[in-house]
Structures are given as C-alpha cells and as structure tokens.
Amino acid sequence: MPLSSQDLLDRWIALAGPGAAQLGAGIIARYAEPHRHYHTVEHLRAMFTAIDELAAEAADIDAVRYAAFFHDAIYAVDRADNEERSADLARDVLESLDAAPELVDEVVRLVLLTRGHDTEAGDANGAVLCDADLVVLAGDPATYAAYAAAVRTEYGHVPDDLFRAGRAAVLRALANQPVLYRTPAARSRYEQRARANLSAELAALTEPGAADVGQP
C-alpha cells in the first residue's frame, strides 16, 4: 500500500522526534509546490517504499532516510544547484536539531550524491539512496509513461526539439552505465525492467517525427 503524507510525517518524527514535527511537515510540504510534476510527494513516497525494501543493505539507515527527505527539498527546473541548496538546508535543519556532526555530514554527502548518482564501491548508504531515487525507471508501462510525461511537463518551457535531445542524452548516459542499481537486491528486482524502459523511451525520442515523452 502506498505511503500517505501522514506516514511520511510519522517517519520524520521517528527520526527527529515529536518536537520536530512542524519542521518535518514543512519539508514534506515543499514536495507539493505547484511547479513540481515529478519531484513530488508521490516521488518521496516511492523512495521510502524502496528504502524500506533495501534497508538491510544500508550502513546507516537513519542517514539514508534523512537524505531522502532532503534530496529534492529545494527544486527549481531552471537551476543547476538544487542538490547543493537542498544539502545546505539539510545541514541547517539537522544542526538546529543538534544532530551528531557525523550524521549531519553524512546526510549532506548523500544529498549531494543524488545529483549524478555516482556512487563508489563500498558506499552502502549511497547505493541504497540512489537506487531508491532511480526505482521509478523500473516502473510498469503505465507508471513509467506517467513519470516520463511528468518530466516533460516540468520542462514545458523547453522547445520540443531541445527537450528530446536533452532527455535522450540523459537516458543514454544512464543506459551506458555498467549497472543502473548498486545494491544486489535492487539490481535483481529492477535492472532488467529499467533498461527496457530506457530503451523504449530512447527509441520514442529519437525516431523521426517522434511525439514527446517525458531527469530522474
């Protein structure tokens, strides 16, 4: 069953304590900003469902869950520094909660990692967070189509030809990676379906006269 907004808030309270409930509600509310179409509360819910499935693979699951809350907390389609600004917000909020410095540093590192999903070998926390962020690539056809359409809507100001070229470049970069998912569990569950989805969208984007299809 999909997580509700209350479920998300309960998870925040479990991490940060009941005294931080208002802060958590404010962070979750950012994902409902009207300019968002993919980077939404629904995306956050899907991430937490995947993190639950992969939790045993993390070294510090609390750091991963905090990073999920913050990873798209600041998002504007016309800016290239969303992850940096979100990481700054994470540091400010966690320091205001007197979180341990090592936890703060790890959450900041993880948020920044979602910019390129370029995890290093042995980075268990990074692998879980990035796999959860990319789980949308392995959706069923209807779910993937909705994701692609939402991405296109977020980039509605970009002309069709430029969008198709840019989106195709993003998908090729993903498809050319040796593996999309770093944790064994995610690779087993999602890799094959995600690659099929990427191939299908790339074909739709690059065929002559292709219609628009919807950046993880």
Image: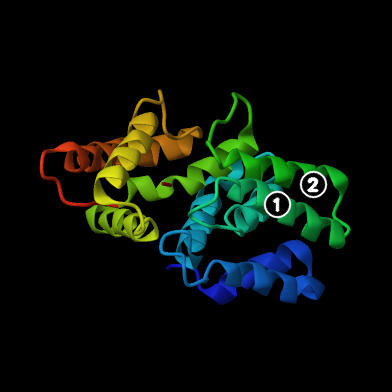
Residue 107 coordinates in the image, percent (x, y)? 71, 47
Q: What is the CA distance from the residue labelled 2 to the residue labelled 1?
A: 9 Å
Mark sitting earlier along the chain (2/1) = 1
Residue at position x 72%, y 69% in the image: 13
Residue at position x 85%, y 62% in the image: 96
SS label for mark 1:
helix
**Quarter of the rendering containing residue 161:** top left
Q: Mark yes or no: residue 57 visible.
A: no
Name the residue tied to disc 2: 103
Residue in front for this viewpoint, 210 or 193: 210
**142 sits left or right of 187 in the view:** left
Does 25 appear above or below 84? below
Name the residue tied to disc 1: 62
Q: Are marks 2 and 1 in contact (CB under 8 Å)?
A: yes
| Position of the N terminus by quadrant | bottom left
SS label for mark 2:
helix
Residue at position x 34%, y 37% in the image: 171
Residue 177 coordinates in the image, percent (x, y)? 40, 26
**Quarter of the rendering containing residue 66:** bottom right
**Quarter of the rendering containing residue 10:** bottom right
Task: Point out which mark residue 135 bears.
Answer: none
Residue in front for this viewpoint, 28 or 75: 75
Query: Three-letter amino acid code at disc 1?
Result: Asp
Query: Three-letter amino acid code at disc 2?
Result: Leu
Residue in front for this viewpoint, 1 or 26: 26
Residue 16 coordinates in the image, percent (x, y)? 77, 64
CA neighbours of label 1 inside 10 A, class few (<14), some (14 to 19), many (20+): some
**206 sits left or right of 124 in the view:** left
Residue in front for this viewpoint, 52 or 170: 170
CA neighbours of label 2 inside 10 A, class few (<14), some (14 to 19), many (20+): some
Residue 181 coordinates in the image, percent (x, y)? 45, 35
Q: Mark yes or no: residue 170 visible.
A: yes
